[in-house]
Image (tube, rainbow, N blue to C red):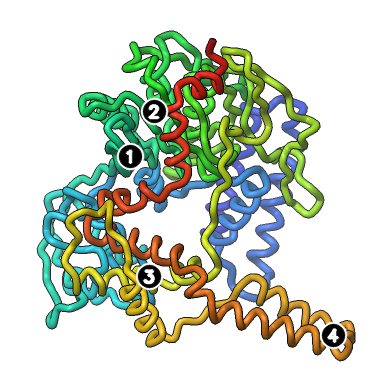
Amino acid sequence: MRKNFKWVSALVIIAIAVAAFKKPAENYFEIAKSLDIFATLFKEVNTYYVDEVDPKKLIRQGIDSMLESLDPYTDFIPEEELENFRITTTGQYAGIGALIGIINKKIIVTHPYKNFPAYKSGLKVGDELIEINGINVQGKTTAETSVLLKGPARTEVEVKVRRYGQKNDLVFKIKREKITLGNLAYIGLINPEVGYIKLDDFTPGASKEVADALTKLKAQGAKKIILDLRDNPGGLLHEAINIVNLFIPKGKEVVSTRGKVTEWNKSYTTLNNPLDTDMPLAVLINEGSASASEIVAGALQDYDRAVLLGDRTFGKGLVQTTRQLSYNAQLKITTAKYYIPSGRCIQKLDYAHRQQDGSVLAFADSSKSEFKTLNGRSVYDGGGLDPDISIEQKYLGAITASLYASGLLFEYATTYCAEHEAPLDFKSFAFADEEYEKFLAWLKEKKFSYSTALETETKQLQELARKERYYSELESELKILNAKIEANKASDLNRFKDEISSVLVSQIAFNYALNEGQYAVSLAHDTVIAEAVKTLHDLQGFNKILAKH
């Protein structure tokens, strides 16, 4: 323990020394004083606390709590977590190329990435992992299992799986490769004139993938494009800039950054000739579109180059920079804010002014400022991007969400695929009434049950009534309410039949043909895409939205 304390003390001394050179003189005393208090406090805890303390764990908790008080994007990354951080930011690692998850307490292959080792070796969606190189993985976490699957490129790993419908376990010998995950989930023609690009990430190569997809779709006859950025959390800034550059001329500002360190402030412009500046473009957004997604959508909106459809975006206008620390650790720290071409910042939450309870509020509507697009349309800052055509996002019903979270929809899709041949045409694939009845019978055997938010609130109301001694007066009404809730729950499987069937068919199509199958069945039922197609076909209305005359 004494050695550990010396290590912590050394870090504190180094921190004080660094602060002396990097902080303004007027702040140095407070910094040195606070660090000295922290060091002496830790010494007292280490010496006198009744139980043994783990210095590394205690310091980590202190660091995490300190950074958490700033914003959710400023993180400490110790040396042992650097590899996972690199995988997240680059999409690259060495392994078999498969996503795994825990479903009903089993480690399951949920996505063997197409054309990577797991897929080429024959692993399928729904396979249960039993052993990896002779090590039993049943009961292990996904993190523990993932470590066993990863390893140096060109090394072999033996994987034993249990597949529904197969009498014996299957063994696959898979040679690991360097895995670089793509950024596009799907590209294709929705109709002979409208191309569709679903972009999921902004890791290295994203802009080239979008450029190649755009070129391919134009060669296939596309005269209009839908770029889907829904639920895209963002990523690398330069990839966002290059994607915008595909649609606007060279030399145009896409985004600028402004922060405390003025010499780091920078304006980023398009550097290349665009692929297409005239093709009608619709960009789909929702509350899951953040950061780099908002830069792309916002810049295209500010230049009146695209019509935005969907819901208001997340509102992440903060820039993170990675700084090197001692002992190979790193700090990912928010250093600036993004400003898109109109001059607006789309940051939604005001982390600089937390409430007394630590909560963070969105910028008030009264504090928002008006800005203008290239054609003079009014746009606003301080709350994400507002779509040009607002389409309310539909959320799954409680029963559908519960079925999905329980893993039962995934499990039934696995059994269905094992017992049926893949459909010849996924676009027309649907559940007949008798097939849904089979699913209900299977579900009954699984003894599925769930709770609604209303049910939870009612139980809390009953407890509160008992606590405040009103229950006797409200008992009859509460019993009637409970009875109605139970009656509604009993009919939910029929009331939400279409929604449940749609999600189930989508999962089945994914099990058969991964993203290609899933998007083939889902695109035809997507109301936002349908509205985008309608908007693109109405060129007069499209130009009117963008104020082109």
Image location of residue 338, percent across then percent down? 57, 26
Query: What secondary structure is marked by label 1?
Result: loop
| Residue closer to the observer: 394 or 186 | 394
* Relative vertical location of residue 140 with respect to residue 445 in this rendering, above or below: above
Which residue sits at x=23%, y=49%? Answer: 94
Q: Comparing marks 3 and 1, which lies closer to the viewer? A: 3
| Residue closer to the observer: 317 or 536 | 536
Which residue sits at x=38%, y=76%? Answer: 104
Marked residue nearer the N-terminal end (4 or 2): 2
Which label belongs to residue 474? 4
Q: What residue does disc 2 label?
A: 239
Q: Comparing marks 4 and 2, which lies closer to the viewer? A: 4
Q: Residues within 10 Å of mark 1 (few under 14, many from 20)?
A: many
Query: What secondary structure is marked by label 3?
Result: helix
Quadrant for the C terminus, please. top right
Q: Give amino acid for label 4.
A: Leu
Quadrant for the N terminus, please. bottom right
Query: What secondary structure is marked by label 2?
Result: helix
How much space separates mark 3 and mark 1, taking CA atoms?
26 Å
Q: Comparing marks 4 and 1, which lies closer to the viewer? A: 4
Which residue sits at x=49%, y=23%? Answer: 542
Query: Disc 3, disc 1: CB below 8 Å?
Result: no
Q: Give amino acid for label 1.
A: Asn
Which residue sits at x=52%, y=61%? Answer: 396
Marked residue nearer the N-terminal end (3 or 2): 2
* Relative vertical location of residue 528 with respect to residue 265 in this rendering, above or below: below
Query: Disc 1, disc 2: CB below 8 Å?
Result: yes
Q: What residue does disc 1 label?
A: 183
